[in-house]
Image: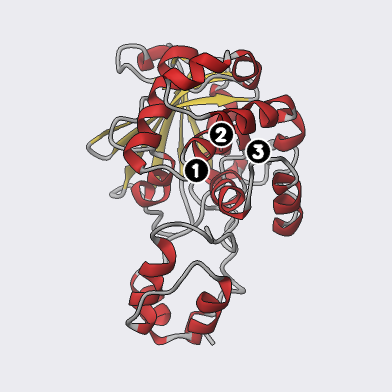
Amino acid sequence: MFHPGSALSAAWASVADVDGRARDWRPGWPCPVGPVLRIHKRGGGDPTYRIDGDRHWRGIRTPEGPTTLLVEPKARDGVVHAEAWGPGADWALAALPAMLGADDDVSGFDPDRHPLVAEAWRRYDHLRIGRTGLVMEALTPAVIEQKVTGQEAFAGFRMLVHRYGERAPGPGRELRLWVQPDAATIRRVPSWEWLRMHVDPARSRTLVTAARVADSLERTVGLPGEEVERRLTSLPGIGVWTAAEVRQRAHGDADAVSFGDYHVAKDVGWAVAGRAFDDGAHALGEAVE
């Protein structure tokens, strides 16, 4: 289980709030809040994520309970302002630096292996990979997205959250912000209800199986990437693509590549070689040699 460390506590400036809790965090680099957080938004109608200008609202199920989290960059002041409501408010605020990439160590990254990578790094060297520490939060939509179109996947996820999730606390209710269902609830969803949400038996069985061992999956945060992948892919229905989608978001693993994705290989191929690559890791690795 991920527990936000206290090493960054000195960077916090606490502000009392009657209805919730608020804190300002000063990152050591120009942290791009939107690009880092938007990876958690599942389509335009994601009920667990709202964007209002520069303000990002998330409905999160933390180990301490459901939470509404507001994150807003204050570039002029050099801080990221955050507010949280609900039982998991303290957990979410303490985890915010990791969510925004504070734990992403770029010291071993060598962008000079390919000129386009070097140019991209020159332009976006402030980008980091965040870590939520919440495995089921990333795994549930990833399984729903297996082998279907984005439109179908996002619709299925919305239905699952609306039917079996709960309203986010505090201002989240007025914002119509939701929190994903917990693992115990996912285990109890009847098979016919999955079909009504357009989630076929293969994917629903995978989700229910994962929900049965959710506590063990949550404990993979902090383990080496290879071990995380081994444990995730040991479950029926979870392959390297799904494992990578989870590792990217929950574990902040910058080395997790979504092999098998319909778009990633082709996009990388056209960018670095002027031709489409297939799904194979060999082609992608060859491109940076």
Residue 203's label in the rendered image is 2
Give the amino acid at mark 2: Arg
Residue 230 lies, with reference to residue 214, above or below; the image says below
Residue 146's label in the rendered image is 1
- Inter-mark Cα distance, 2 to 3: 31 Å
Residue 160 lies, with reference to residue 281, above or below; the image says above
Which residue is tagged 3?
4
Closer-to-camera residue (156/94) = 156
How many residues crowd mark 3 within 10 Å: few (<14), some (14–19), many (20+)? some
Closer-to-camera residue (89/281) = 281
Q: Position of residue 156 (x, y in %)?
A: 41, 28
Dividing the picture into quadrants, the one containing residue 176 is top left
Give the amino acid at mark 3: Pro
Q: Residue furthest left?
A: 53
- Residue 88 seen in the current view: yes
How many residues crowd mark 1 within 10 Å: few (<14), some (14–19), many (20+)? some
